[in-house]
Amino acid sequence: MNRLKQFARSTSALVPVLMMGVTFLAAPAAGQTADPQPATATATATDATPQADAPPGGDIVITARRRSEDILRTPVAVTALSSQDLAVRGVTTINDIANFTPGVNVNNNAAGRNDRSFQQVIIRGFTPSAATNPTSALFIDGAPVASPSAFSSISDPERVEVLKGPQAAYFGRSTFAGAINVVNKVPGDVLAGSVGGMIGTRDNYKLHADLEGPIFGDKLTFRISGDRFSKNGSYENKAVPGQTLGDQKTTSGTVMLVAKPTDRLTIKAFGLLSEDKDGAPAQGLISAYTITNAAGAVVVPGQSNCTLTGRSPTGAAVSNPFFCGKAPKLSSTTPSSNTTNDSVIQDFLANPNGRLVNPDDGVQGYGLVRRYYHMHLGADYEVGDTGVTLSSLTSYNNERYSQLSDLDNYGDTTIVNLTPGGRSYFDFPYLVERINRDFSQELRASYDQGGPFKASFGGSYLNSFSQGGLGGGNGALGTGAYASAVSGATRSRTFGAFYGLSYAVTDKLTLNAEGRYQIDKLYAYAQPTGYTATTDLFVPVGFYAGGSKLLNQNYKHFLPRFIAQYQATPAVMAYASYSKGVNPGLFNTAFLTYSVAQQNLASAAGINVAVSPEKVTNYEIGIKGRFFDNRLRMSLDGYFAPWRSQINAITMNVVDTVTNTTQIIRGSANTGAVDMSGIELDGTFNATRAIALNFSAALTDSKIKKFQNATVIAYSGITDFSGNENPNTSKYAATAGGQYTGDIGGLDRASWFGRVDYAFKSGMWADAANLVKTRVSNTINLRTGASQNGFSIEAFVNNVTNNRSYTTIADASVFTNNFRYSTYNSALIVGLPDLRTYGLQMKYRF
């Protein structure tokens, strides 16, 4: 009852709007004259091909419940970006999708790194503890994918669906806060394709080609595509004049085969291969302390604007300079990174000892190398005229990456290294490697014969494997204690049984009952070199052979969703839903390779091997509809979602005073509880045949009820976080776009367009202490172009105003040769946006 009262309070502003929508907006405006052929907000001059599965009127069909439905009649909060939307807005990455979707953020920042190896997709403010423990899941054609990098490899999809709220019944594991599903275009039986390219400032370029058509008439068709994308970063490395930070390069290819051996059977096979080769990332160091070399010259200026009373491990008060309010602007010494690929680095990276990725396949210098493979096979068979469809979906993912960063985040070489055997100057290169693999299988039976009752039943299986490796530091890289080490692997096996029932009680009222029973089996294994437990703090004392099982844990959950939807008029629908979600637990294994003393410190900080699942209950109401003779299409929803047993990341820097080295200890723990609530708006308005507008907005609120993190408490002194907001997410966000399309007189089938897009996101807190946050972000993009008979040309300017607001923010420690400031958080690492970019692109469709 208390939760229902909270939900009512949190969405009280939404209720009057919903009532107005049902009772007033559905009625046509007085004197309104319908445009005989209203333009859609997604139509463009350069890509006006209608969606293959769109019904008359331009409505978007989505598959949020694994069946084709009009987005305005689907009782789920979902934002859909069609292929036309993506093309005309220049959306090519998961970060672009987040920029144009209020309530969605992407965080690339953790442990001193801000790069593409670490990408958290944050929906509705559900900030995950780590990239390895996402709160939302990613899919291609409903098949799970292991990495957001897959989204950059599908350059011309049919649409992208962003589903908000728990989606366990139809999408399964890790859809705790929502899901993003990329839907591929299905090849036709006529030979067609396109070639295109883009060039822009800072050596931006992109090449694309695709081809589709028949192999055996309409019985077997194909579609293949290839892409190459590259750009130089927007920022000069202050340590290496002329070198840029933030360079990225991706090469990818896809293939799809569609077989229809009979009218009732359809088989779709899809494969994707991509490779990323990035340089050192674009990130800035903001230090609370001034760092000088032996001559007294300032290497890193201190920019602290407040002093906190923190707590030492013994509980004593400690004075800590830090940051309060808006994060300071970058100093003149940053961004800076040591990217010297000397013999020390080369020898370290060539050493196979303790490496997870073969040195020949790994990174060859500072930056990132990632290879990703995905394939899935889907089949649908219609059983006679029964209305029953049997479906199978099989999927496999394999991702491996190798990334070397300069974790001190300044490229100075004048500070003497106090550690024997290393470089003469202080530096902290650090290698991170990871392998992720998974296999999944889903079987489903669906019933829909056009009557009031619809149903689906099925089962699923997921087998997921993950393993990481770390290494580096300020010592003799590649030898002794400073060599990289591979941690023990973790595996999860998930079994699920699900159902979805829908019954139209009347012409207006439909009730939906969905659910999934899920069993998660988690396993943790010893590191490849074996593990000797000298303390029973985490596992029984004894020797564990390499790869042998250390721990296992089983979790069982039932995850229901109930939805009542009311079709007030043929054009307006309102709904209310109740659902539950669970994010699987995990194992911390990397710190088991550390000393007993370091394990004791981890335990004192709340890091244990086993971490329990986190849970959420979601209450939601919404309205969707078409108004004013179909010119205005809008969806509006509000939600309240208590998040319990929240998993939070804990990072500690432990300094060894004997060897003068520091060990980074990372882990996760169930230390939080947060009440999430918000309001989301999405819509389009066709003012005239030539003018199309789109708009969206979100209020993403969070109130921490409970939170514990020894690292945050130590630097801030704050022990009561109640009432604070979740970090790494924008509370307020909005987008607006406008497009004018016109004919070019005197030319056959020729048209032109001009478009402006605006995206706003409010600042994000660095952590749950809510002491320092980023500034608001305002981004404006401009595009204009023309097309005739399949040929199109466009010019664009992205980030017109040169917005420099940080894209991410995270706590960090300043590394010096004596690690004086590394015990507590003493710095910020901030992600830097791409600056103003001019470009020209051309495409030819045939």
Image (cartoon, grey):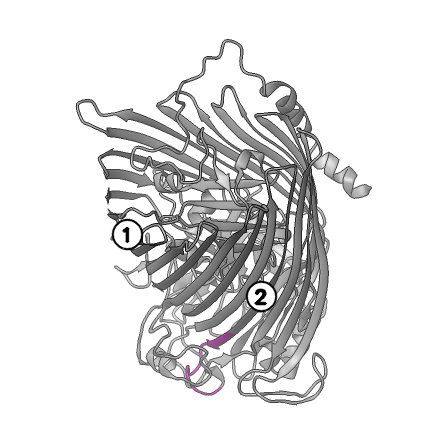
The percent coordinates of residue 800 (x first, y second) are 34, 38
Residue 473 is inside the magenta segment: yes
Label 1: element kind: strand
Image quadrant in which you'd find residue 415: bottom left
Q: Is residue 627 above or below residue 273?
A: above
Residue linked to disc 2: 462
Marks 1 and 2, the one that precedes in the sequence? 1
Q: Between residue 108 and residue 805, name the one nearer to us.
A: 108
Q: Between residue 751 and residue 109, name the one nearer to us.
A: 751
Q: Going by the picture, which residue comes out furthest to the left?
A: 746
Q: Which dot marks residue 211? A: 1
> The disc labelled 1 sits on which kind of residue?
Leu
Boundaries of the magenta span? 468-480
Q: Between residue 731 and residue 424, name the one nearer to us.
A: 731
Residue 485 is inside the magenta segment: no
Q: Residue at image x 41%, y 52%?
A: 832
Which tag is nearer the camera, tag 1 or tag 2?
1
Label 2: element kind: strand
The percent coordinates of residue 639 (x first, y second) are 66, 40
The percent coordinates of residue 64 (x first, y second) are 55, 45
Q: Is any part of residue 718 visible from this angle?
A: no
Q: How crowded is mark 1: few (under 14 residues within 10 Å), some or many (20 or more)?
A: some
Q: Residue at image x 23%, y 29%?
A: 749
Q: How crowded is mark 2: few (under 14 residues within 10 Å), some or many (20 or more)?
A: many
Figure quadrant of the C terminus = top left
Q: Is any part of residue 448 visible from this angle?
A: yes
**How many dots with numbers?**
2
Q: Is residue 87 above or below residue 370?
A: above
